[in-house]
C-alpha cells in the first residue's frame, strides 16, 4: 500500500547493507520508522530529505507494518540550523525530546504544528536562547496530557499562598500542605514565581521566546524542575541539559 504524508526527520540510523532507518514525525501517522537505501552521499536532491531537520512530503510503501521510502519532496530544510551551534543545540533538544515522548503511529497534530512553528522560529531568529526549547517542552505538556495544575493546591484544592511545586503531585501545593514531606526531593520551592512563569510560557507564541533571556539562575532552576517533571511523567531523562548533548545527527 502506498501512503503519503508530511513529516519531519527526527533521527537517522545506519543499518546493515548500506541501508538506513529514518525516524519521521509525520502529520498523519505520528512517529514512524522508515527504511531507505538513500544515503547522504547520494548527490540526488532526495538525499536532503533523509536528514534530520528536514520537513518533506514522503511517499511510503507500507507492507506488513513496515514502511519503505518510495519518494520524497523536500518542503523546507532547516539544515542551516546546523551551521549555528546554539541553534543546533536548541534544535537537537527538541528532536531528541520528540523522539522519546512520541508514541509510534499515533498522530498528534497539535505537537506537529508546534514543531513546525518551533523550527520556523529557530531558523529565522537572530538571537537565540535556551528558553525557546524550554518553552516548547512546557507547551507540549497539555498536548501530551501531562499538564501540571497551576491554579489550586493539588492536595487541599485551595489557592496556595506560599507556593511549592510538587512533581509527584503534578502541580502546585501549599507549603503548609507538605510540612511533613521535607524528605521528598521532588518538591521544589523556587526563588521566582513559577506559576507566573509557566503561565507565560503557555500563553505566548513561540516567536516571542527568541528574545526572552531568563536570568541564568532562573533558567537553571526551572530546567531542573522541568527535567524532573518529564522524567517522572514521560520517562525521559536529561533532555534539557546545559551541556552539549551527544547526538549522531
Ligand atoms: Zn494545600
Image (spheres, helix red, strand yellow):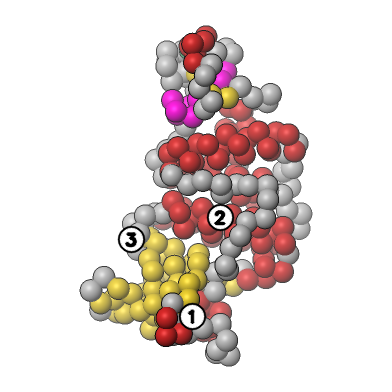
Q: Nearer the viewer, residue 136 or 121?
A: 136
Rounded to the nearest whole Å, what is the CA distance between mark 1 and mark 2? 23 Å
Q: Nearer the viewer, residue 180 or 211?
A: 180
In the image, taking residue 6 as reference, residue 245 lies left or right, namely right
Question: Which comes before the other along the chain, label 1 or label 2?
Answer: 1
Q: How busy is the neighbourhood of tag 2: few (under 14 within 10 Å), some, or many (20 plus)?
A: many
Rounded to the nearest whole Å, what is the CA distance between mark 1 and mark 3? 21 Å
| Image quarter in which the N terminus is found | bottom left
Q: Which residue is mark 1?
A: 73
Q: Nearer the viewer, mark 1 or mark 3?
A: 3
State which region is magenta: 163-172
| Residue 90 among those drawn in magenta | no
Q: How busy is the neighbourhood of tag 1: few (under 14 within 10 Å), some, or many (20 plus)?
A: some
Q: Residue at x 61, y 22 (%)?
A: 189
Rounded to the nearest whole Å, what is the CA distance between mark 2 and mark 3? 19 Å
Q: Position of residue 21 (x, y in %)?
A: 43, 74
Q: How busy is the neighbourhood of tag 3: few (under 14 within 10 Å), some, or many (20 plus)?
A: some
Q: Which residue is mark 2?
A: 94
Q: Position of residue 26 (x, y in %)?
A: 41, 65
Amino acid at each position: 500500500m502506498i501512503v503519503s504524508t508530511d513529516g519531519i526527520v527526527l533521527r537517522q540510523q545506519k543499518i546493515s547493507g548500506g541501508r538506513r532507518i529514518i525516524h519521521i514525525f509525520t502529520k498523519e501517522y505520528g512517529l514512524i520508522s522508515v527504511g531507505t537505501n538513500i544515503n547522504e552521499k547520494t548527490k540526488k536532491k532526495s538525499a536532503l530529505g533523509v536528514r534530520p531537520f528536514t520537513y518533506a512530503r514522503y511517499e511510503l510503501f507500507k507492507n506488513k507494518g513496515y514502511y519503505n521510502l518510495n519518494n520524497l519532496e523536500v518542503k523546507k530544510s532547516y539544515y542551516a540550523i546546523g551551521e549555528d551551534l546554539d541553534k543546533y543545540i536548541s534544535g537537537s533538544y527538541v528532536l531528541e525530546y520528540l523522539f522519546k515522548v512520541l508514541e509510534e503511529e499515533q498522530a498528534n497534530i497539535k505537537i506537529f504544528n508546534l514543531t513546525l512553528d518551533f523550527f520556523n522560529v529557530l531558523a529565522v531568529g537572530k538571537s537565540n536562547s535556551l528558553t525557546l526549547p524550554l518553552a516548547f517542552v512546557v507547551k507540549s505538556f497539555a498536548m501530551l496530557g501531562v499538564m501540571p495544575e497551576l491554579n489550586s493546591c493539588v492536595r487541599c484544592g485551595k489557592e496556595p499562598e506560599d507556593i511549592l511545586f510538587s512533581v509527584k503531585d503534578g502541580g502546585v501545593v501549599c507549603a503548609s500542605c507538605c510540612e511533613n514531606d521535607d524528605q521528598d526531593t521532588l518538591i521544589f520551592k523556587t526563588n521566582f514565581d513559577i506559576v507566573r512563569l509557566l503561565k507565560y510560557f503557555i500563553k505566548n507564541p513561540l516567536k516571542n521566546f527568541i528574545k526572552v533571556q531568563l536570568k541564568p539562575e532562573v533558567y537553571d532552576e526551572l530546567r531542573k524542575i522541568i527535567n524532573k517533571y518529564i522524567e517522572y511523567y514521560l520517562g525521559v531523562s536529561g533532555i534539557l541539559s546545559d551541556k552539549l548533548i551527544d547526538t549522531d545527527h
